[in-house]
Image (cartoon, coloured by chain):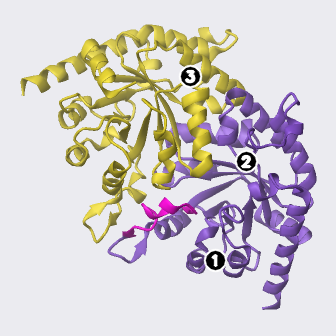
Chain colours: A purple, B yellow
Amino acid sequence: MTKEELYQQILQKQSYLCVGLDSDIEKIPARFKSETDPVLAFNKYIIDQTADFCVGYKINTAFYESNGAAGWETMQKTLAHIPQNIFTIADAKRGDIGNTVHQYAKAFFKTLDFNSITVAPYMGKDSVSPFLEYAQKWVILLALTSNPSSQDFQFLSINQDKKTLFEEVLTRSQEWTNDEAMMYVVGATQASMLQKIRSLAPKHFLLVPGVGAQGGSLQEVSKYGMNSQIGLLVNSSRGIIFSENPKESARKLQQEMQQHIEEYHKK
Amino acid sequence: MTKEELYQQILQKQSYLCVGLDSDIEKIPARFKSETDPVLAFNKYIIDQTADFCVGYKINTAFYESNGAAGWETMQKTLAHIPQNIFTIADAKRGDIGNTVHQYAKAFFKTLDFNSITVAPYMGKDSVSPFLEYAQKWVILLALTSNPSSQDFQFLSINQDKKTLFEEVLTRSQEWTNDEAMMYVVGATQASMLQKIRSLAPKHFLLVPGVGAQGGSLQEVSKYGMNSQIGLLVNSSRGIIFSENPKESARKLQQEMQQHIEEYHKK
């Protein structure tokens, strides 16, 4: 999917919502548990309920891998149920080098036909390049994460205090490709950092997890993160999929997002 | 597996060899291709040929994920074929937070019964802690990797030039657990760095990939990396599994290692 196609879908749906399919089998409603593949049945239900209100689905691979080979089959079948025009994210946080990354690219862009994958930056450009050989596929690089221990390394001062590690990740990685093939993960609990991030990456889409259950504010994220092509994919997982009414939860977020889009255009 | 058990196995076999099952289906010998599961048949052959000479097997998950659900089944069956007393490594380089890491831990320590998993450090302590809840299981944290672009971030100077990022990873992570539950990945092409690493982590086991195909020298790694409990797992993948005679290739490396162990004890 191209950036323009994603943008057009955002405009059409007036939404930059991404629904996270963190479909923990322990937490899905009891009525699905008698199905042959409970997680798949649950995912299909969630997708059918929310597809009108979101522009992306994020599949957190850990929740599928924990069920082994059967879990990978569930992931594959879930992906097949997502409407073609909706952006798909393998939240896999892979990161390796050389022929290994080529295998990961094959796994997520060919064997599974995801539009994008999240990638960890620690090993540098080599971890990213093989993914970029696939046209219209995206790398979503971890920049700033929403967990308490993001402080351990991401905020370290480098190059004599001139910047932090996550800022260096944001700037260095822009030498590898452009905003038509790369996005960044930016934790929503760090909304105060969004202004800085936008100054370093004004045009890139940002994938923002952590709104809802993790405490991020949609209003702040939208205020500081939005750009002229919206430039945001805000993810909500548990807050939608395990809510009493996933359709209404998604619609409510979409309506809030529509307001934020309107406010942006008034500026 | 405990550290002592691993050490005893090293002493018994006079080897610190780890065989990497990077079993690319494109590269395995033609005679396996008619099997129902060619990669599994190949892996069983390699394990049978090499088990006397190595103390560990490293399964690079990318090579299995690229074949989707079937690949995960191959991984599971491969693991079942590895003798119980040999150390197993899921070279998965996972790294995430909160309930997601719990799912990865379940995937690799319960659904699949690996002894250890490689983990990426970027997200900090939260990416590691859930793995540590499993007794006698190991986290092998990426510290210094053997690829050219390890320069991008791992060698950045932090805290006003006092140290580099990979050194900070080595020291900070020792606050999270000890050398009975954590090892470090240290690329063998960086043998010159091993002295520094040993000064920061004298007692930890180091998993050293990159010997052989990637150009690392076993002699240098052994000279600078060995400690009183040997403290090394040196991995070779392609150099063994795709050699004409995997058994002899493994035996040859074991014999070299035996010499290095003897030299160490002469010192």
Which residue is pictured at 26% across the width and 41% down the height? B191
Q: Label 3 lies in what chain?
A: B
Q: Amino acid at mark 1?
A: Pro
Which quadrant of the structure image shows residue A252? bottom right
Which residue is pictured at 14% across the width and 20% down the height? B262
Q: Which mark is residue A68?
A: none
Look at the image and tell me whether residue A63 can be seen: yes
Can you identify the residue that label 1 sits on? A202
Please provide percent x and percent y for residue B186. Answer: 34, 41
Can you identify the residue that label 2 sits on? A22
> What secondary structure is found at the residue carrying circle 2?
loop
How far apart are the alpha carbons under marks 2 and 1?
29 Å
Q: Amino acid at mark 3?
A: Lys
Can you identify the residue that label 3 sits on? B27
Q: Label 2 lies in what chain?
A: A
Residue under disc 3 on the same chain as residue under disc 2:
no
Is residue B8 shown above or below B162?
A: above
> What secondary structure is found at the residue carrying circle 1?
loop
Task: Specify start and end residues of the magenta stretch as a single range.
Answer: A143-157
